[in-house]
Image (spheres, rainbow, N blue to C red):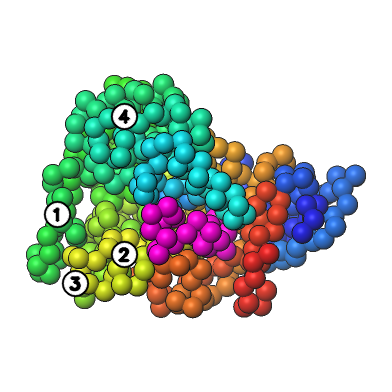
Amino acid sequence: MSSRFSICGGRVIDPASDFDAITDVHIAGGRVVALGDAPADFQAEWQLDATDLIVCPGLVDLCVRLREPGAEHKGTIRSETRAAACNGITTLCCPPDNVPVTDTPAVAELLQERAWLSGMAKVLPLAALTIGLRGEQLAEMGDLREAGCVGVSNALEPIENTDVLRHALEYAANCELPVFLSPQDAWLGHSGCVHEGAISTRMGLSGIPEAAETIEVSRDLLLMELTGAQVHFSHLSTARAVELLAQAQAKGLPATADVCAHQLFLTDMDLMDYNSQCHVYPPLRSTRDQDALRAAIQAGTVSVICSDHQPHEKDAKLAPFAQTAAGISGLDTLLPLTLRLASELSLPLPQVLRTVTSNPAQVLGIEAGHLSVGSVADICVFDPNAEWQLSIDNMHSLGINSPFLGWHLKGRVRYTVIDGRLVYQRLDNLAEVA
């Protein structure tokens, strides 16, 4: 498609600037050149009709595992970036726990090159905090930053040695890289697979206590204060952790956090039939924890919702519960679940869209997540009233491991634009990728 076009008649929402109006968006050269009336010298070569649709910035997802390199039978860069684009996600951040680990510039460059060749969603890699994610020797964060990494993380591997973590945070601060920490004590609940409580006892499964998360959050906040590092907590799951984060923010610490979309709708009660599709890490917690996570989103204490996308092959979920692979294929449900949360909590649409657009972009410090004159034309156009049922047949990811199969959802992407290119469109119930 030509790069000069207009999106006409939609409700344009830019959460970053609180812009919300029914108007037109004009795009040329990969950027937004005007909202409302077109510039005098602008002539659209084609148009998209967005009547009764929402036009917003492309979604930014802070946690997407592409499975390539190392586990291409679960997913590939091409398949999962395509799935992202089909769901309005234009930028995604991938943790470093692929094989090989993203602890060298070569791996970081490989990820970005293959994503560029796929021509779909933009891939921003996180660099390993320690070599091999072993928690012993620091990775060369400066070199990895030059190779395009936008942050550092030890993925789901805890750093047992507090001195190593302190120096890692200091190094990251010197490199001006945000540190993504998944709070999990190295020993508490290390063999568990579900939330420790009455449900785990009744099911006879080893539990992961709340303290496994809160102890780490406490340590990390103290080290953040000591080192001045920019810390982002990935997928918080407990009420107590949210409370600790709120206290730190009240003291002026600029800590941020995200929550996985599935944690806002599922609890350990959903495990009662040993449904392996609900085997996730961190585990699904109690109703009390879920209520606290929802309240934290509402208050802005937790500012980001992510998919925590982890595609698996079918066999990975067929063993007894404790032996199945943890993780949910979440790209296909990120937007509809976010919209469902807005409905259930009576949140304004711009507020909830901020959690998947401008807020995650701000955490990364990237030019994305906003829709204003001069911004990069990464745009999601969706029908907020489209009702549909999630099934294996309409999932775009190679991974079909989702506990939301069979759920009736509302909100579906109609068009996705990346860098001013129409990469996805849905016409009548028939999905087409441009």
Mark nearest the camera among 3 and 4 is: 4
x and y percentages locating residue 125 in the rendered image:
46, 43
The residue wearing badge 3 is 320
Residue 67 drawn in magenta: yes
Q: Residues within 10 Å of mark 4 (few under 14, many from 20)?
A: some
Mark 2 residue element: loop
Residue 376 lies in quadrant: top right
Mark 3 residue element: loop
Marking on residue 266: 2
Mark nearest the camera among 1 and 4 is: 4
The residue wearing badge 4 is 138
Residues tagged 4 and 2 counted as in contact (Cβ below 8 A): no
The kind of residue tagged 4 is Leu
Q: Residue at x 26, y 53 (%)?
A: 282
Marking on residue 191: 1
User: Mark 1 or mark 4: which comes first in sequence?
Assistant: 4
Residue 221 drawn in magenta: no
Give the Cα distance between marks 2 and 1: 22 Å
Q: Residue at x 9, y 64 (%)?
A: 201
The kind of residue tagged 3 is Pro
User: Mark 3 or mark 4: which comes first in sequence?
Assistant: 4
Mark nearest the camera among 2 and 1 is: 1
Give the Cα distance between marks 3 and 2: 20 Å
Compared to residue 420, the image places residue 198 above or below, namely below
Q: Residues within 10 Å of mark 2 (few under 14, many from 20)?
A: some
Q: Nearer the viewer, residue 337 or 376?
A: 376
The kind of residue tagged 1 is Ser
x and y percentages locating residue 176 in the rendered image:
45, 26
- What is the magenta range? 66-90
x and y percentages locating residue 354 in the rendered image:
52, 48
Compared to residue 201, the image places residue 39 above or below, namely above
Give the Cα distance between marks 3 and 4: 37 Å
